[in-house]
Amino acid sequence: MRYVSMCLLLLVAGVAQADTMTTPASTLASGSLLTDAGMTLPRESRVPGGIALLPLPADAPDGTQVWFGKQRVWVLSRADGSRVAVVGIPLSAKDHIELHLIADGKDNTIAIAITPKAYKEQHLTVSQEFVTPDPKQLERYSREAAEQATVYKAFHATSGGWPVFHMPVVGIINPDSFGSVRFFNGEPRAPHSGMDTGAPEGREVHAPADGVVVQTGAYFFNGNTVMIDHGNGLVSMLCHLSRIIATPGQHVKAGDLVGLVGHTGRVTASHLHWGVSLNDARVNPLLVLPEGAGAEMAAGSGVMVPLQ
Ligand SMILES: [Zn+2]
């Protein structure tokens, strides 16, 4: 709620909204660069919901695979032959995570320290059915969650590099929305696993990066949704659409139209929810965007206040 009041104040005062949007991105940017020796990489942030960039030891055999639990991790190779594992850190991570470097039948375990992060609380009021669903709705939800989990857990190896991401919609980013501890009608629920951007109903939603549309559906909580597999365990989810335009199996390029902004599912107002999943861990979408992308979008936007 604090963000909403702050945002309203800024709108009333008519002062630099863009400044508000750049602060979180720059605080997240501590650590690595987006471009590393000609290779695009996400920003590193070793916190729950963040991303770790783990250089592989130079003597790790060719074909070394990195696994996080049952999930394979994307390993990128630079032109000089060095390799880096790009690891999604789940929001549920505690003080460390363990990775397994597997080659020639050997399993080398590496622990990575995770810095705790206190995400903000968000209190929202929604239709009561989204807080205490009836048994039929719960059954529907578990079916849909299983469908989405299949997409998150898939690892389709591609030879390309880490994709260049763009904001999927023009609007006002709520930079505090990812990871926020949610209370719906006063009741605690799972943390928010995506980033919300306030935008009017009907505004175009674009693929944030190249990929394949692997799933579309009208889901109970997420509303009309498009899931895009960017390869190697990296997936985008675009939710609450008024209209789905992409179809499963469709290959999309960054910027292709995939749907229209709406307010379907568990929402308080029209907006786009964009989730990014890496090795089945939901990570902060700000980490995959070029620095300042949020500010750019906010500057050219309307005056919507993001709420969910
Ligand atoms: Zn959301």
Image (spheres, rainbow, N blue to C red):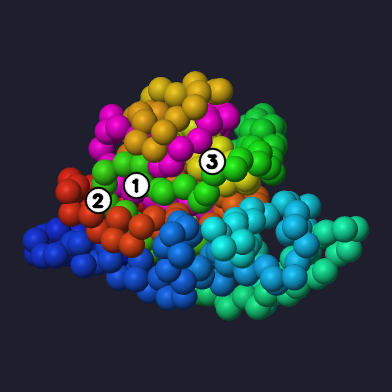
Disc 1: which residue: 167
- Quadrant in which residue 257 is drawn: top left
Q: In the rendered image, which residue does mark 3 sit on?
A: 230
Q: Earlier in the sequence, mark 3 or mark 1?
A: 1
Is residue 82 at least partly visible in the picture?
Answer: yes
Which residue is at the front of the view, 182 or 290? 290
| Mark found first going from the N terminus, 3 or 2 | 3
**Tag in front: 3 or 1:** 3
At 46% from the left and 71% from the top, the residue drawn is: 32
CB under 8 Å between discs 3 and 1? no
Q: Nearer the viewer, mark 3 or mark 2?
A: 3
The amino acid type of the residue labelled 3 equals His
Q: Is residue 149 above or below residue 17?
A: above
Q: Amino acid at mark 1?
A: Met
For the residue with label 1, is its CB less than 8 Å from the closest atom of ligand 1? no
Query: What is the x, y in percent for residue 260?
Result: 34, 30
Magenta span contains residue 213: yes
Q: Is mark 2 within 8 Å of ligand 1?
A: no
Secondary element at image label 3:
strand
Helix, strand or loop for disc 2: helix
The residue beneath circle 2 is 297
Q: Nearer the viewer, residue 61 or 48?
A: 61
Give the residues in magenta.
193-221
* Element marked by disc 1: loop
Q: Are marks 2 and 1 in contact (CB under 8 Å)?
A: yes
Q: Which residue appears at 40% of the width and 29% of the height?
A: 258
The quarter of the rendered structure image containing the N terminus is bottom left
Query: Residue shown at 89%/63% (left/top)?
Result: 106
In three-dimensional space, the C-alpha distance between marks 3 and 2, rounded to whole angstroms, equals 22 Å
